[in-house]
Amino acid sequence: MSISELIDLASSNDKNAKSKVALAKLISIVERGGEGARQLGRAIFAKTGNAYVVGITGSPGSGKSTLTDKLITSARVDSRVCVLAIDPTSPFSGGAILGDRVRMNDHVDDDRVYIRSMATRGHLGGLSYSVPEVIRLVDAAGFGLIIVETVGVGQVEVEIAGAADTTVVVVNPGWGDSVQANKAGLMEIADIFVINKADRPNAKETMRDIQSMLDLGIRNDAWRPPIINTIATNGDGIDELYKSICQHGDFVRSTNELVERRNKRDKEDLIRVLKRSLEDIISQGWEDPSIAQLKKRCLDHELDPYSASEQIIKQLFSVSERKT
Ligand SMILES: Nc1nc2c(ncn2[C@@H]2O[C@H](COP(=O)(O)OP(=O)(O)O)[C@@H](O)[C@H]2O)c(=O)[nH]1
Ligand SMILES: [Mg+2]
């Protein structure tokens, strides 16, 4: 099946599993990278820009997957929902991926819901190269809402905030001790705070704690992040959370905020695609005989790596021209 046939099938709202199978195939193409991914990226670009992206971040075990599972039930009424669960732990662990799948099992047969776990492939703890591209793909396939779940570990939180239109930060009662160093960072990225496991002691203190940090006004935009108590396991507070997400969506659409966020993202996309294209050029040409001599001279310390790189780059580009 051609890429455009797969895209059409993935976009269709069929009642059998074919559309999900097509989408899974397309995601694999993105993850493999190279010319296939580039071709796909070109084909879908014009169809992108319609989905709303919600990032959900927080420490492992804070209840993000349980919350997401409940959110799907509210959100699927309004639009097709895709969940991308990013697992920044080692791709060898596998446990978290299985855990998410099992927990969100309720939605497996729902043709309006697509759930996918992705490993970050050790990209220095950051969002995997592929994640923004998969977001675009799912967007082009007509999903109105994309929820991206990430474990909040520093840099990833910042990156997810960059990829999302609304960022939900999940904490638990008594969060103070565990994320002390990171509080300011969380304040910067959170559009909505969730205190999940509100059935546990100290939810009130945590609420006061966040309030007083918000009062310091690290972010001086017109939106003050609401703080919502939830008990994800029994669904308490989920309606309020979904309502807040919609309200924040209305806010960013009615101000210049959404346009600004997406402009910034487009710029990052361009740089990322550019870097990836350069990496492809390097790996395609690396074994070409035309640079063998330069590599050897560098390894023999006759040529410093800086001068060697400059000359290798010129060669790599001509190799790439020859191949296309
Ligand atoms: N007591 C309580 N447990 C919860 C709540 N939400 C989630 N949990 C439990 O916390 C554990 C971790 O939840 P999970 O959704 O996997 O967290 P994640 O790692 O952030 O995705 C699971 O055992 C959940 O059942 C809650 O509101 N209250
Ligand atoms: Mg999870």
Image: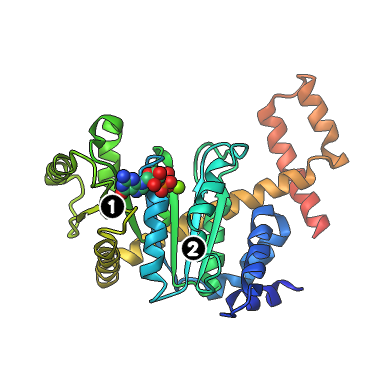
**First in sequence: mark 1 or mark 2?**
2
Q: Check disc 2 and report its element: helix, strand or loop.
A: helix
In the rendered image, which quarter is residue 144 located in? Answer: bottom left
Q: Residue furthest front?
A: 234
**Mark 2 crowd level (few <14, some 14–19, many ≥20, 10 Å Cα):** few
From what the image shows, is residue 161 above or below residue 140?
above
Query: Residue at label 1?
Result: 231
Q: Is residue 264 visible?
A: no
- In the figure, is residue 177 to the left or right of 70? left
- x, y percent for residue 140: 54, 72
Which residue is found at the position 27% from the left and 71% from the top? 250
**Mark 1 crowd level (few <14, some 14–19, many ≥20, 10 Å Cα):** some
Q: Check disc 1 and report its element: helix, strand or loop.
A: loop
Q: Is mark 1 within 8 Å of ligand 1?
A: yes
Query: Residue at label 2?
Result: 106
- Image quadrant where one finds the C terminus: bottom right
- x, y percent for residue 111: 54, 74
Structure colour scheme: rainbow
- In the figure, is residue 249 to the left or right of 281? left
Foreground residue, 41 or 71? 71
- In the figure, is residue 162 to the left or right of 29? left
Identify residue type, mark 2: Asp
Q: Residue furthest top?
A: 301
Q: Is mark 2 within 8 Å of ligand 1?
A: no
Q: CA distance from mark 1 to mark 2?
A: 18 Å
Identify residue type, mark 1: Ile
Mark 1–mark 2 contact, CB under 8 Å?
no
From what the image shows, is residue 226 above or below residue 92?
below
Foreground residue, 235 or 140? 235
